[in-house]
Image (cartoon, rainbow, N blue to C red):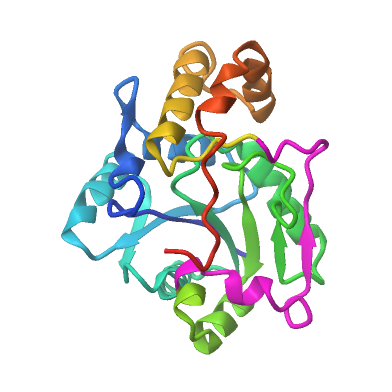
Amino acid sequence: MKTVIIIQARMTSTRLPGKVLRTVLGKPLLAYQLERLQRVRAADEIVVATTVNETDDAIVNVCKQLNVLHFRGSEQDVLERYYQAAVKRSADTIVRITSDCPIIDPRVVNQVIEFYHGHTECAYVSNCLPRTYPVGMDTEVFSFEALEKAYYEAVSAPDREHVTGFIERQPEVFRQANVPYVADCSHYRWTVDTAEDFEVISSILTALYPRNPYFTLEDCLELLTVHPEWEAINSHVKQKAYNEK
């Protein structure tokens, strides 16, 4: 059974274009994320699923520099992009990660994957239904069969863009489970969708990465107790719902 992490990434994000290649300490955010995800022991491969647009040549170049697989597909139909990437890599299990989560903890991803493989009755496992992890630790794991069914049956634009909305809404069809954190830390926002988000992530990386590139979720939480003012920088930013552009 082959488990493949598929990361969706594009340069034309609506709220902060080019965010995935914004740099901190001279290194693009996508490179930080890939470095961290390469430590996920329960995954066999990582694929960056970007678009055929010329603007995303820069993402492909980063993948080539880091010797990471990439796939190019539709910009708007992200569900198709995921499906075709999964087919190309012969994936049995898909791990969905978005490129706006540069400090995602590989231990968290590993835990969700292992939970999925330990609960074979489930077609879909997430750690944000309901959310207890900080935003930015989001991990979804699902079967190729579930992805294929969604690919052929989902018709609405939000379902095609969000990838897993069709699956999430049908627990009677796709048996689901959630992996919670030990505490409710959902008020922390460690994703990059706005300039304020980038300021927070930049502060975290600058403080932690030079002395410990293997920093964890708990290291971030500890840092925020020292700098509680950082949380306020982007606390007003609302996470986009799956049916929003």
Find residue 112 and report its horizontal and vertical position in percent: 71, 51
In the rendered structure, the answer to whether residue 58 lies left or right of residue 177 reads left
Q: Which of the two residues, 46 or 33, is positioned nearer the viewer here?
A: 33
Would residue 170 be counted in the magenta stretch?
A: yes
Can see residue 143? yes
Which residue is pictured at 58% across the width and 37% down the height?
A: 189
Find residue 129 and report its horizontal and vertical position in percent: 73, 57
Would residue 167 be counted in the magenta stretch?
A: yes
Magenta residues: mostly which secondary structure? loop
Q: Which residue extends farthest left? A: 54
> On the rendered image, what quadrant is the N terminus found in?
bottom right
Which residue is pictured at 59% across the width and 51% down the height?
A: 43
Above or below, 108 relative to 229: below
Based on the displayed image, in which of its 4 quarters is residue 77 positioned? bottom left
Find residue 195 and report its horizontal and vertical position in percent: 38, 35
Q: Which residue extends farthest front? A: 236
Count of marks, rendered view: 0
Find residue 144 and report its horizontal and vertical position in percent: 59, 74
> On the rendered image, what quadrant is the C terminus found in?
bottom left
Q: What stretch is highlighted in magenta?
A: 161-187
Above or below, 186 relative to 122: above
Q: Which of the two residues, 233 or 124, is positioned nearer the viewer here?
A: 233
Can see residue 38? no
In the rendered structure, the answer to whether residue 108 lies left or right of residue 153 reads right
Above or below, 74 relative to 96: below
